[in-house]
Image (spheres, helix red, strand yellow):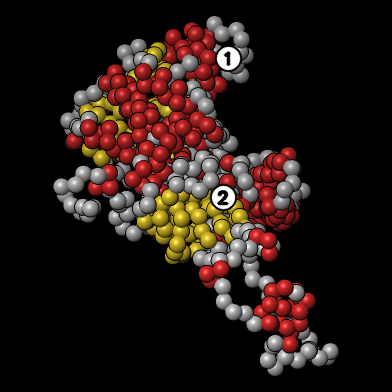
Amino acid sequence: MASQEDPTVSSPSAAITPLTPFKYSNRVLLKTITERADERPELIGQRVVIGGWVKSSKEEKKSSPIAPPLHQSDKKVDPSKTKDVTCVEILQSKIPLIRSIMEVFGRTGYAPPKKDEPVTHKPTPPQPSTVYLMVADGSGVASLQVVVDSSLASPSKLLPTGTCILVEGVLKKPSAKGKQVIELEADRILHIGTVDPGKYPLSRKRLPLDMLRDFPHFRPRTTTVASVMRIRSALSFATHLFFEHNAFFDVQVPIITTLDYEGLGKMFLVTSLEQKADEDKLKTISEVEGVDLETVKAAVREKSNIVENLKRSDSNREALVVAIQDLKKTNELASQLEARGKTKSASSFKAPQIDSSDGFFSCQTYLTASGGLHLETYAYALGNVYSFGPRFQADKTDSSKQAAEMWMVEAEMAFAQIEDSMHCAIDFFKYLCKWVLENCSEDMNFVAKRIDNACITRLQQTVSVPSDIVSYKEVIDILMKVTDNNFETNIQWGVSLTREHLSYLADNIFKKPVIIYNYPKESKPFFVRVNDDMRTVAAFDLVAPKVGVIVSGGQNEERLDVITSRIKELGLPREKYEWYLDLRQHGTVKNSGFTLRFDLLILFITGLTNVRDVIPFPRSQGKIIN
């Protein structure tokens, strides 16, 4: 017989390719095993090392069969193999009572136990068992079943959800029928990271997403959050790929800035100096208002303990919601007393101003809300540029679409007008949707099953159907004809479109993403180009169903006199924008760009409703854990 290594012999085994371990460790990623395992029979019999965390488990005790007594009539004696036997052997085989007596008196040195000596009993050894573990390592949605004999490790260490294991074994077909098409029979345990089920928060099944936010260090181990983060990672990669293919340069803009991007004042102050509260003034204000600050702080601590106890218990959901709302209101009261307070005349006082001259910088600085203005300086030199990073806004509005720290994709193009910017934004948006469909099918199938069964259809429609582009004026005309919805804000030309208006347009009128352009100049920042009608500006928003505005953009004002007039009109400090005005004085050019709200895009793709569930470590008012 020819050996397997004989190159002249063609056999199925000769085509077997061993599974390749991860380059930087000796373990094999589970995705390479579970992905289409039913179509890869060559996996069976391969020896691998895998690592991961236990998602679910079960233990099956091994039966200890005792052979039934053999009747004499069943015995078949081979005459050729018979031999001489003694009388004692005959008596032992024929008479059970005599056999027992012979066993007792046949023992050498036998003595009956004394009455006052305790008879010791050996502890009963644990019954052998087999442990079945569903293990995931984060590389994909599917888990791999790992079979471990109790002789290798104590089942009590392996069974708890969340246990980390590193094992070596052989891939086999499952011994029992089930969903699994392949399993790993372990013969070596290389590592066990144990879990305390009483303290591990994921020991409970199917925790709601809002409760998972209290454990940001553990929530990536859930299948839902892991799938969303893999989709997020794929979109991040696709973002850089799109701009690379379209001749854009990646520019890192500053996170610390002196600019109030839109003049709204909702920015985080950056300082290296200590800011001490005026305790005496706060105390006086509290007493005047009949509210003791220390009492409020004590109430906050007490209500926090109540909420934590409810979260750890199996109390009803309504009680927890009420307790959280109560805590939130008390926190707000404490914040008001600490930050502002109120005098008898209901006038507020401002916190002491910081003398920036003694600080790290010579002036007040903030966490940036946008890198668009800085990005323009490089567009004037490199042509087409983009930036991808975190942006910050100290907006205390309690919204499911807003967080204090969100990631943005910003792009700027020289020699481009609003039409160019709109087309680029649409292409980019569709490119990301298509990328997810083609490269995240396993995760999207899970999302469709567990979160939103229409998510895949929605993306397919977005990619294949042309986007509608309508002006602000056309939108106002459409909304004024609506009779089946009473909007809180009256519809008339010049009004800022609220989330209520935008949701109705995308969900009920167009039923797909739509671009709205040429807004009233009062509703957009100072740097957006004023149109010839002097009433509108060349700005646009891409509005998507269920989410709202995902992309905002437009053409920037390149005329020095017009932008100077806008800065003065809005009362902005000109000295902060002198460098920006310099661009208009020296080699100005028409330019346009856009900002894509990356976190809201993931909401649109997955069908989730709260932006905090798609951000790895969400930050919002009063909520920062690690």
Residue under numbered circle 2: 56
Residue 361 versus residue 13: which sits nearer the camera? Answer: 13
The Cα atoms of the two marked residues, 2 and 1, are separated by 54 Å
Q: What amino acid is found at the position of numbered circle 2 in the picture?
A: Ser
Above or below for 581 versus 530: below
Residue farthest along the bottom direction in this orientation = 109
Residue farthest along the front direction in this orientation = 79
Residue under numbered circle 1: 490
- Characterize the local packing of mark 2: few (<14), some (14-19) or many (20 or more) Cα atoms within 10 angstroms: some
Task: State the image coordinates of residue 485 (x, y, percent, origin top left).
Answer: 61, 13
Could you say whether the residue bearing mark 1 is in a helix, strand or loop? loop
Task: State the image coordinates of residue 287 (x, y, percent, origin top left).
Answer: 74, 52
The residue drawn where x is 33% and y is 59% is: 25
Residue 166 versus residue 63: which sits nearer the camera? Answer: 63
> What label does residue 613 carry, if any?
none
Circle nearer the N terminus (2, 1): 2
Residue 366 versus residue 478: which sits nearer the camera? Answer: 478
Could you say whether the residue bearing mark 2 is in a helix, strand or loop? strand
Task: State the image coordinates of residue 437 (x, y, percent, origin top left).
Answer: 38, 29
Left or right of 221 on screen, residue 573:
left
Q: What amino acid is found at the position of numbered circle 1 in the picture?
A: Asn
Above or below for 165 versus 373: below
Tell us which disc is closer to us: 2 or 1. Answer: 2
Above or below for 185 versus 114: above
Residue farthest along the right direction in this orientation = 115
The residue drawn where x is 33% and y is 45% is: 42
Task: State the image coordinates of residue 481 (x, y, percent, origin top left).
Answer: 54, 6
Residue 561 makes an appearance in the image: no
The residue drawn where x is 60% and y is 7% is: 483
Q: Disc 2 vs disc 1: Cβ atoms closer than 8 Å?
A: no
